[in-house]
Image (cartoon, rainbow, N blue to C red):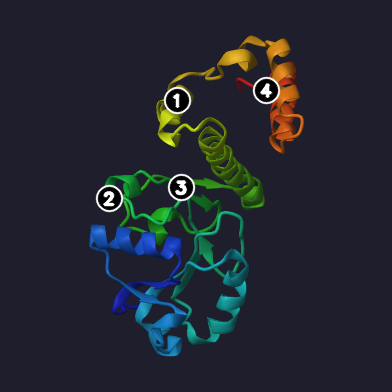
Amino acid sequence: MQNRKYPYLIIGNGRLAKHFKHYFDLLGVNYLNWHRQTGESLDLILPVADKLLVLISDSQIVPFIEDHSSMVKEDQIWIHCSGMLETELAESAHPLMTFSNELYSIDTYKSIPFITAKNRLSFIELFPELPNDSYSIESDNKLLYHTWAVMSGNFVSILWMEYFKVLKDKFGLPPKVAWPYLNQIKENIFNDTDPLTGPISRGDFVTIEKHLEMLADDNFHKVYKAFIETQNKSKASGTQDE
């Protein structure tokens, strides 16, 4: 690979781009950043980096690469970080993490595992400067992998945001009253092979039915019922503890 001025060009200005820039800054990794608001010519910037990290919306990655591939040399590498996208136009490394508006500490960034596709360039080949753990999966499984990542991260957040709202609006309680509960749930998930508690753990269907009656006119009635049905099917099929 030609020795260019920058090992990385970060393309984009969204949350993920900002987190990558901060992580690179913390590690002292040299990079250049381009996004449309810079007003600079991408034609002049693309040739100066070895690896072109495209951190834009998933649906725009392939069109962007196709539109600019003629400006790139064969020894330059396109990289994207989408969890669902697999394309021959670019290598991929998905950070299994949620990225908020707040930037993280270096220890948090180092703890993030990256998921790559098998039979493509490895994580160490793509990011030799980064100390993160990495794993590879079959390309055909990426969409399922990403689906579960989105569900596990965002559905939990939706539920807890609604719970905080109910505590405040229905009972006049501050959200922080539930923080110890949330922290212990996290600890139980990390450390207990059977973290479920309360009527769901006990199989107390009398209480569960009363809960469903209370939620009869609430949108979360379907959510509660769906989780109970899923839990029952998991227990019946013996897949819960696998």
Q: Nearer the viewer, residue 70 or 175?
A: 175
Type of amino acid at the residue the image marks with label 2:
Ile
The tag earlier along the polypeptide, 3 or 2, is: 3
Q: Nearer the viewer, residue 152 or 210?
A: 210
Q: Secondary structure at mark 2?
A: helix
Residue at image x 55%, y 35%? 163
The residue where tag 1 is placed is 181
Q: What crowding class fits label 3: few (fewer than 14 Cα within 10 Å), some (14-19), or many (20 or more)?
A: some
Residue at image x 75%, y 23%? 213
Q: Is residue 160 among what the camera can see?
A: yes
Figure check: 237 above or below 74 = above
Q: Is residue 235 among what the camera can see?
A: no
Q: Which mark is residue 106?
A: 2
Residues at badges 4 and 1 in contact (C-beta under 8 Å)? no
Residue 33 position in % (x across, y down): 36, 75
The quarter in which the N terminus is drawn is bottom left
Q: What crowding class fits label 1: few (fewer than 14 Cα within 10 Å), some (14-19), or many (20 or more)?
A: few
The quarter in which the C terminus is drawn is top right
The residue where tag 4 is placed is 239
Type of amino acid at the residue the image marks with label 1:
Tyr
- Distance of label 3 from label 1 (alpha carbons): 22 Å
The tag earlier along the polypeptide, 4 or 1, is: 1
Type of amino acid at the residue the image marks with label 3:
Met
Q: What crowding class fits label 2: few (fewer than 14 Cα within 10 Å), some (14-19), or many (20 or more)?
A: some
- Distance of label 4 from label 1 (alpha carbons): 27 Å
The tag earlier along the polypeptide, 4 or 2, is: 2
Residue 228 position in % (x across, y down): 71, 24
The residue where tag 3 is placed is 97
Q: Nearer the viewer, residue 36 or 85?
A: 36
Q: What crowding class fits label 4: few (fewer than 14 Cα within 10 Å), some (14-19), or many (20 or more)?
A: few
Figure check: 232 above or below 124 = above
